[in-house]
Image (cartoon, rainbow, N blue to C red):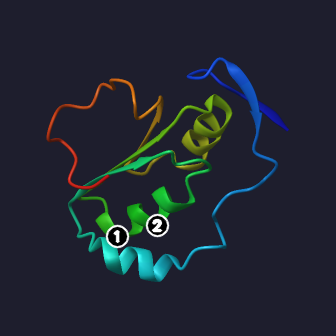
Amino acid sequence: MERGNPSEGRKHKHRGKFTEGLLDNELILKALNIKPGQTILDAGCGNGYMSKLFFNVVTLSGRVYALDPDKYLIKSLKNETQGTNIETIEGDITRPTHLSESSVDLI
């Protein structure tokens, strides 16, 4: 499926290629040392699988911002995560966002 990337003004194809299933999620979570109550920014979240894992660790006392320039993926993730503390943001990490300075514990 072809999806537009508004930050680059051209089309790209994901072809279903994500890092999901290729990484050791347990090792990543351990290395990041995420704690309940923290605020995490998942920059370039793609389909949001790591955002969902971060949500499980920060619990309802924390927050996860899931940022990606792909409008389709962000809309899909927003629908999947309604009622959670995952906030989806369509955007590019290299451009300003609505997030306040020092509002994120880990990117």
Q: Which residue is mark 1?
A: 57
Lateral position of residue 14 relative to residue 35, left or right: right
The tag on residue 21 is none
| Mark 1 residue type | Val
CB atoms of marks 2 and 1 within 8 Å: yes
Query: Could you tell me residue 53's position as x and y percent?
Result: 46, 66
| Mark 2 residue type | Leu
Lateral position of residue 63 relative to residue 89, left or right: left
In the foreground, 35 or 11: 11
* Residue at the outermost right position: 1
Quarter of the figure that contains the N terminus: top right
Q: Is residue 100 above or below residue 57?
A: above
Query: Could you tell me residue 88's position as x and y percent?
Result: 46, 38
- SS category of the residue bearing label 2: helix
Q: Which residue is mark 2?
A: 53
Lateral position of residue 84 relative to residue 33, left or right: right
- When asked about the image quadrant of residue 54, the answer is bottom left
The tally of labels here is 2
- When asked about the image quadrant of residue 74, the answer is top right
- SS category of the residue bearing label 1: helix
Q: Label 2: few (<14), some or many (≥20) within 10 Å?
A: some
Query: Could you tell me residue 52's position as x and y percent?
Result: 49, 60
